Image (spheres, grey):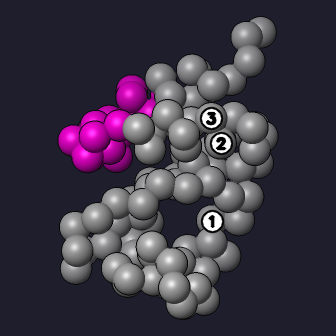
Amino acid sequence: MYHLYILHSETSGKYYIGQTNNIDRRLEEHNSLSINSFTSKYRPWSLMISIPFENRSQAMKAEKYLKKKPRDFIRRVIADQDLQEYIVAKYQPPG
Protein backbone atom coordinates (compact mmCIF):
# COMPACT_ATOMS: atom_id res chain seq x y z
CA MET A 1 0.00 0.00 0.00
CA TYR A 2 1.26 3.46 -0.92
CA HIS A 3 -0.01 6.83 0.19
CA LEU A 4 -0.26 10.17 -1.50
CA TYR A 5 0.17 12.75 1.25
CA ILE A 6 -0.19 16.48 1.67
CA LEU A 7 1.82 18.29 4.31
CA HIS A 8 1.32 21.84 5.51
CA SER A 9 3.75 24.25 7.13
CA GLU A 10 1.84 26.51 9.50
CA THR A 11 4.79 28.90 9.77
CA SER A 12 5.09 29.51 6.02
CA GLY A 13 1.64 28.53 4.74
CA LYS A 14 3.24 26.21 2.18
CA TYR A 15 1.99 22.79 1.12
CA TYR A 16 4.08 19.78 0.12
CA ILE A 17 2.79 16.79 -1.85
CA GLY A 18 4.53 13.44 -1.89
CA GLN A 19 4.04 9.67 -1.90
CA THR A 20 5.39 6.89 0.29
CA ASN A 21 4.79 3.39 1.58
CA ASN A 22 5.42 4.49 5.18
CA ILE A 23 3.71 7.74 6.08
CA ASP A 24 5.00 7.92 9.69
CA ARG A 25 8.62 7.45 8.63
CA ARG A 26 8.30 9.95 5.80
CA LEU A 27 6.77 12.65 8.01
CA GLU A 28 9.62 12.15 10.49
CA GLU A 29 12.14 12.52 7.65
CA HIS A 30 10.55 15.77 6.48
CA ASN A 31 10.67 17.16 10.00
CA SER A 32 14.16 16.08 10.98
CA LEU A 33 16.51 14.34 8.54
CA SER A 34 17.13 16.42 5.46
CA ILE A 35 19.23 19.56 5.79
CA ASN A 36 19.27 21.32 2.43
CA SER A 37 15.90 20.46 0.96
CA PHE A 38 12.65 22.23 0.24
CA THR A 39 10.96 20.74 3.28
CA SER A 40 13.81 21.51 5.69
CA LYS A 41 13.31 25.25 5.14
CA TYR A 42 9.67 25.29 6.25
CA ARG A 43 9.57 23.03 9.32
CA PRO A 44 7.58 21.89 11.16
CA TRP A 45 5.28 20.02 8.79
CA SER A 46 1.86 18.65 9.69
CA LEU A 47 0.13 15.84 7.84
CA MET A 48 -3.09 17.21 6.37
CA ILE A 49 -4.22 14.12 4.48
CA SER A 50 -3.07 10.70 3.37
CA ILE A 51 -4.83 9.00 0.46
CA PRO A 52 -4.16 5.25 0.03
CA PHE A 53 -3.34 3.69 -3.34
CA GLU A 54 -2.82 0.04 -4.28
CA ASN A 55 0.68 0.59 -5.67
CA ARG A 56 3.45 3.13 -6.11
CA SER A 57 2.72 3.80 -9.77
CA GLN A 58 -0.80 5.00 -8.96
CA ALA A 59 0.42 7.15 -6.06
CA MET A 60 3.14 8.70 -8.24
CA LYS A 61 0.68 9.57 -11.00
CA ALA A 62 -1.69 11.17 -8.51
CA GLU A 63 1.23 13.07 -6.96
CA LYS A 64 2.25 14.44 -10.35
CA TYR A 65 -1.37 15.45 -11.05
CA LEU A 66 -1.71 17.34 -7.75
CA LYS A 67 1.65 19.06 -8.01
CA LYS A 68 0.38 20.83 -11.13
CA LYS A 69 -2.72 22.15 -9.36
CA PRO A 70 -3.05 25.55 -7.67
CA ARG A 71 -3.09 26.00 -3.90
CA ASP A 72 -6.88 26.46 -3.80
CA PHE A 73 -7.36 23.06 -5.42
CA ILE A 74 -5.03 21.46 -2.85
CA ARG A 75 -7.13 22.98 -0.06
CA ARG A 76 -10.26 21.54 -1.68
CA VAL A 77 -8.69 18.08 -1.86
CA ILE A 78 -7.90 18.23 1.86
CA ALA A 79 -11.48 19.17 2.74
CA ASP A 80 -13.52 17.23 0.17
CA GLN A 81 -13.92 13.44 0.51
CA ASP A 82 -15.64 13.22 -2.89
CA LEU A 83 -12.68 14.91 -4.57
CA GLN A 84 -10.29 12.50 -2.81
CA GLU A 85 -12.32 9.54 -4.08
CA TYR A 86 -12.30 11.03 -7.59
CA ILE A 87 -8.49 11.22 -7.53
CA VAL A 88 -8.19 7.61 -6.36
CA ALA A 89 -10.61 6.42 -9.06
CA LYS A 90 -8.79 8.44 -11.72
CA TYR A 91 -5.56 6.49 -11.15
CA GLN A 92 -6.83 3.00 -10.43
CA PRO A 93 -6.88 0.61 -13.36
CA PRO A 94 -10.31 -0.23 -14.78
CA GLY A 95 -11.96 -3.39 -13.59
Task: Choose top left, top right, bottom left or bottom right for residue 24.
Answer: bottom right
Q: Is residue 10 left or right of residue 81?
A: left
Callout 3 amino acid = Lys
* Residue where numbered disc 1 is placed: 23
* Residue where numbered disc 3 is placed: 61
Image: 68 above or below 89: below
Q: Is residue 67 left or right of residue 93?
A: left
Callout 2 amino acid = Met
Image: 63 above or below 27: above
Q: What whole-number distance in Å separates the C-alpha atoms at marks 3 and 1? A: 17 Å
Residue that appears at 55% across and 56% down:
18
* Residue where numbered disc 2 is placed: 60
- Check whether the beta carbons of the residues at disc 2 and disc 3 lie within 8 A of each other: yes
Image: 52 above or below 31: above
Residue that appears at 26% across and 46% down:
71
Instruction: Identify the main secondary structure in magenta.
Output: helix
Q: Secondary structure at mark 1?
A: helix
Residue toward you, 82 or 73: 73
